[in-house]
Image (cartoon, rainbow, N blue to C red):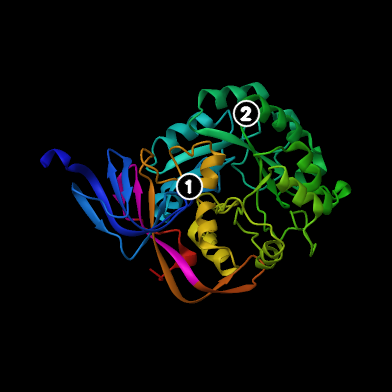
Amino acid sequence: MENHIKYYDLVLLDAWVIDPSQSLNGRFDIAIRDGKIAAISQQLKTYKSKLKFAAGNYLICPGFIDLHVHVYEWKTTFGVPADDVGINAGVTTIVDQGSSSPFTFSGFKSDIVEKSQTDVRSFLLVNHAANQTIGNTVSGLENPEKIDRETLIKVAQANPEIVRGFKVHADSGSISRWGMGVLKLAREVGDRTNLPLYVHTGELFPVDETNRPNPEKVVENALSYMKAGDILGHCYSCQPDGLMGNRTQVPEWLYAAIERGILLDLGHGLKFSFETARRMIAQGVLPHTISSDAHGNFKQMHDDSTLNYSLCGGISKLLALGLNLADAIAAVTINPSRVLKAEAELGTLKVGSIADITILKLVEGDWLFVDALEQPLKAKHKLIPIGVIRSGELIQPNCRFLRDLVAIA
């Protein structure tokens, strides 16, 4: 009989599990051994475990993936600590969107990736020096003359586990000075590496008013340089040159882009509009991925006082706007893992995958969120992370950056 006993390091018992990668939504036991998922069953039989976790009151999901953060702390004005927006916010994998370039990546790798408990990936900025240290100024950030294609490709190919794509901007400020030159070069780099582009949308850098582009054409024109698997960021932005802009109806070209495989990411950040989200959701336009765009103050070094939003907060807001819970979980698990081409190991609870797990409380009550335009949103639920498992290790988050969910756990 002893020979039939299975031995585990950690077992989660009677958990409410939502794992869209396996179409699971129900009660399961989950066993972990050697940092991997060893078993998942409605009732594990004949086993011994070093640690058992009674999970009956919690929602258990594959480890959350935040596809858009900025964590090159100290090198950029707006970089925040990776673990504070990662494991300490209920997130096991984060993707830094463009805080490093090929010429600053080595420092990012040694100082951030290798020193963080959170799994940190990167979309490299398509720019010569990632000259963002001084923040939101006219720095030549999107000047085509500052693109070194060969070095971008070399760094990406030398670091395939970390570099999973490229970040580029399609905003009125950049386009007023340099047109679509950077997008054209980014397309070439993406094609040669078989990696996706993450395209920022919404006015960001100061605009040359003598050459301001038509705001309704900015994203439409950018799509000419995008292909299936590329991502449009800030899909529910209130910016006039964003996906929706000042329209009330979703444009046909956006439906066509989605149909051909362009992906939409929430990229919460500072410009998330509830009204824009309502209109687009009502017309069938949902985010493929949900991300926070967590960052600090652009103009003050190491000042995170403006960061009052989180990944779990963004999910909670979208639930209040009508998004289905299972769809929301997919948008922070299996969907971003596919963007990273890591679906065999991340964003899933399949046996053999990395034991990255987010442990949550779905709390009921009456709360009020406020968006970038100071518009209110009543919510009946909030998702509160109360723990994560990272490569098999159970961790209690400090929740320092969950200011939008404060005092609810």
Residue appearing at x 56%, y 27% in the figure:
156
| Image location of residue 189, percent across then percent down | 67, 28
Residue 91 visible in the current orientation: yes
**Disc 2 residue type?**
Asn
| Image location of residue 309, percent across then percent down | 53, 61
Taking the image as shown, residue 185 lies to the left or right of residue 110, namely: right
The quarter in which the N terminus is drawn is top left
Q: Mark 2 points at which residue?
A: 194
Secondary structure under tag 2 reads: loop
Taking the image as shown, residue 59 lies to the left or right of residue 284, namely: left
Residue 70 visible in the current orientation: no
The quarter in which the C terminus is drawn is bottom left
Label 1 close to label 2 by CB (< 8 Å) = no
Residue appearing at x 49%, y 35% in the figure:
108
The residue positioned farthest toward the front in the image shown: 1
Give me the disc on residue 21: 1
Secondary structure under tag 1 reads: helix
| Image location of residue 216, percent across then percent down | 83, 53
Give me the disc on residue 3: none
Image-quadrant location for residue 179: top right
Nearer to me, 239 or 319: 319
**Disc 1 residue type?**
Ser
| Image location of residue 367, percent across then percent down | 51, 75
Nearer to me, 152 or 332: 332
Would you say residue 375 sits in the magenta stretch?
no
Magenta segment, which residues? 381-396
Q: How crowded is mark 1: few (under 14 residues within 10 Å), some or many (20 or more)?
A: some
Image-quadrant location for residue 225: top right
**SS assignment for the magenta stretch, majority:** strand
